[in-house]
Amino acid sequence: MRELFQTYTRYNTWMNQRIYAGCAKIPDADRKRDLGAFFKSIHGTLNHLVVADMFNLARFKGEPLPALKLDSTVHENFDELRAVRAALDRQFADIFATATDAWLNEEIKIVSVIYKTTFTCQRWFYAMQVFNHQTHHRGQVTTLMMQLGVDPGPTDLPVMNLTA
């Protein structure tokens, strides 16, 4: 199971690098413009993903959640946000590089900020949610990028092995 999540972390990092590289071609005002997405803009969505992964890493590490809301702006500056994203991706890679099946099968308690409830699930199950969440919102970002004339390129998992 560890190899599966190592692949997910590689894909997650690969796609985040591609998304940020594409978004760097978009003027800052356009990245921050409300385009009708759930988190309004590309920048808002990228910030949401950073906040969510700060929460997710805290949960995996058994640490307290950061004092942020899901729509918080971690950084107004794109390059600073990009650096935080890269650091989070390295932390995910480090966690799953040493994950064991026993650790992945352990139950963890999740305090949901969205649903205002607590639930318990196996760590591997929650990891699936984490990577699915990233993919979901990156899909929104790629749509917004296309609307602004920037093609994000291929996003399919098998393509990662062709271009990495």
Image (tube, helix red, strand yellow):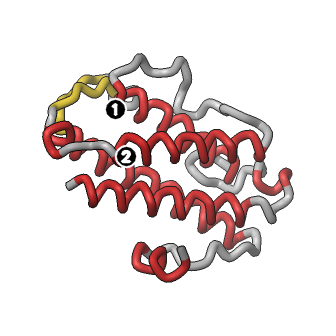
Looking at the picture, does residue 22 appear above or below residue 53? below
| Residue where numbered disc 1 is placed | 60
**Whole-percent x, y for residue 8 in the image:** 37, 59
Residue occupying image coordinates x 71% and y 63%:
21
Answer with left or right where residue 58 lies relative to residue 139: left
| Residue where numbered disc 2 is placed | 130
**Whole-percent x, y for residue 74 in the image:** 66, 32
Residue occupying image coordinates x 27% and y 59%:
3
Precedes in sequence: disc 1 or disc 2: 1
| Quarter-of-image position of residue 143 | bottom right
Q: Which mark is residue 121?
A: none
Residue occupying image coordinates x 45% and y 63%:
11
Name the residue nearer the viewer: 101 or 70: 101
Name the element at disc 1.
Answer: helix
| Quarter-of-image position of residue 72 | top right
How busy is the neighbourhood of tag 2: few (under 14 within 10 Å), some, or many (20 plus)?
some
Q: Amino acid at mark 1?
A: Phe
Looking at the picture, does residue 145 appear above or below residue 58? below
Camera-nearest label, 1 or 2:
1
Label 1 – label 2 distance at C-alpha? 11 Å
Looking at the picture, does residue 4 appear above or below residue 110? below
Q: Amino acid at mark 2?
A: Val
